[in-house]
Amino acid sequence: MRLTSKVKFWSLIIVMLALVIFPSSIARPNQAETEAIVMAVGVDKADESYEVFLQIVLPVQGTTYAESLVIISHEGSTVAEAIEMLGLNLGKRIGFSNCKLLVLSDSVAGSNIIETLDYFFRSELLGTGIALVNTPGSAKDIIEAGSSGTNARLNSIQNIMDFNKMFVNSSEISLNRFLKEYLRPAGVSVMSVLSTKTPDEPATESETEETETSTGKLELVNNGAGSIFKSGIKIADLSYEHGRGFNWLDPDSTRGKTRVEGVTSTNFNNATVIADLIGKRVCVNAKMVNGQPIIEYRIYCTMTLSQVKQAGGNVNLSGRKSYFDNELKQKLKEEILSEITTSLDLAYSRNADLMNFYGRFNRANPKAWKEYLGKLDEPGNYLQGIDVETTVYIEGKI
């Protein structure tokens, strides 16, 4: 069969394209040769300069993931300048698309951090869902601890953040959520806290289950703490106990443990009881009564018993018997209310509207809320006049 001139023409074009494209594709360097893949970012501050630490992956054939992790750093008068210099010194494009964590030290948090966060937000270097963490020490220590031993998975840090989102002991904060809270009228945001310790330092009771061990010099520690920011500046530490109290009011925190002592009931005699929270529903009602702002919380908790200890040892909880009598339920309610009260006392003492009461009243009754604010000598002190009424309901499961 003879080929037509049209077929010959297109055949020639295809051959020419193949000669041009295929060799260039073969010669093109792979991503690892031209790009440094960032897994975590840390920012420290000294005087008027910033130091940025990047945990990056530089894949080398025959090495493990942990062996491919490298930490690089550079100083600059701004975060942007430090990152630019890191790329120049490395000779590679810095890729942030896989970054999971941004760590800010107290040296950064002590001044307004919004400029730093705004740079990452507007430059779109980091995804808005990235975990945001404060540390009382150096951000460098967190990055290093996340690069050694078992922590080198880096998933360990993400696991901690995911754990905190669900359990009643702390709250996970993303870059996007932090900035949204900052832009509210109250201007109050919370940030999760990670710290480090040396392997020979004992862990506290709240740290025991959430500490990631490491064969390196430092270990990551999650003790359920947080930091309170107002107008972008850190104003207070949020302890493990305070975090628990606030999270009882948070519908998203649906797991945790509650310990009560001295339980004497039809089932127990001066027992120590540990109850697991397996479900929670929170109903909130903000109302104005004769010009007085009142916010009502109704917290419905579903719990099961995990351990009961009294004289003679642990109580066998097997079988189909329900141990949630009125005496035990009352003890659990009192403990939960005590934790909530302690946390609210902190919020009021710092004039920090962590619960966004402003937004709730403004949505529920904007006219009455505006009138209330207008009667205050200082509208920014609106929190002091709000009454909080909390009721806890306990449902026991076998």
Image (cartoon, grey):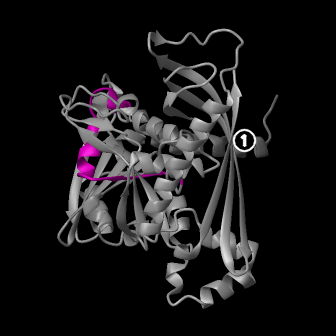
Residue positioned 77% across, 44% down in the render: 5
Q: Which residue is mark 1?
A: 8
Q: Is residue 86 above or below residue 353?
A: above
Quadrant location of the N terminus?
Answer: top right
Q: Residue at x 58, y 47 (%)?
A: 248
Q: Secondary structure at mark 1?
A: helix
Which of the 4 image quadrants contains residue 106?
bottom left
Q: x%, y% of residue 184? A: 56, 72
Residue 151 lies, in percent from the top left, at 33, 31
Residue 346 place in picture, x, y as percent: 43, 61
Magenta stretch encompasses residue 133: yes
Vertical position of residue 239 compared to residue 177: above or below: above
| x 65%, y 46%: residue | 13
Q: Read off the magenta span.
A: 129-153
Q: In front: 35, or 370? A: 370
Name the spot of residue 125 as percent of width and height, x first.
Answer: 45, 59
Q: Is residue 10 left or right of residue 50?
A: right
* Front residue of 256 and 6: 256
Pick the residue in front: 64 or 35. Answer: 64
**Circle 1: residue type:** Lys
18 relative position to 243: left or right? right
Tell me, yes or no, whether the highlighted magenta stretch contains residue 25. no
On the rendered structure, is 273 left or right of 282?
left
